[in-house]
Image: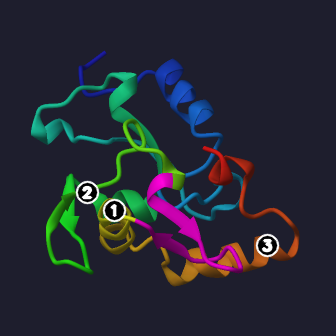
Amino acid sequence: MADFQISASLRQQVIRRAFGCCEYCVSQVLFSPDPFSVEHTTPRAKGESNELDNLAFSCQGCNGHKHIATEAIDPINGAMTPLYNPRIHQWDEHFLWDEDFTIVVGRTAIGRAKVERLHLNREGVVNLRQMLRKFDRHPPDRSINP
């Protein structure tokens, strides 16, 4: 196996650890029309590895917007800040849901930068959250206490 490949066993560990949800926007793979992938929290292009502690489960939208970024600008203070990393940060310390649980709000510079960089409130994701909310399927349990 080439060193850039992620084994099926490792991929399953990442998915289980994420409870089948994107570790950024908290979309559920079960209800997503788009594929999810196992991505590198710190990209291989920046010297990181395929170790479990450098991998995250990500929807296509978040993965595409993140690309190889590890930092972004906080829209409030304009400072470059590290992006939220699910291996070292806690979701509920950096994010919260709005009153109807459809919009992710950044609580910290790290959270705000991630919301903006990954477009965590993309129209399609918000629409899906609204529909799932009507059937008590959103937010998933892991988004409240990840």
Residue lying farthest to the right in this orientation: 135
Could you tell me residue 112's position as x and y percent? Answer: 35, 70
Q: What's the magenta region?
A: 93-107
Labels 2, 3: front one: 3
Q: Amino acid at mark 2?
A: His
The quadrant holding residue 101 is bottom right
Looking at numbered disc 3 in the image, what kind of residue is underneath it? Arg
**SS at mark 3?**
helix
Labels 3, 1: front one:
3
Mark 2 near mark 1, Cβ–Cβ under 8 Å? Answer: yes
- Where residue 113 appears, as percent x and y from the top left, is 30, 68
Give the quarter of the image for residue 53.
top left
| SS class, disc 2 | loop
Which residue is denoted by mark 3 in the rendering? Answer: 133
User: Where is mark 2, residue-wise?
Assistant: 67
Q: Is residue 46 above or below residue 2?
A: below
Residue holding disc 1:
64
* Residue drawn at the location 55% of the way across and 62% of the way down: 34
The 10 Å Cα crowd at callout 1, few under 14, some 14 to 19, many 20 or more, is few
| Badge 1 amino acid | Gly
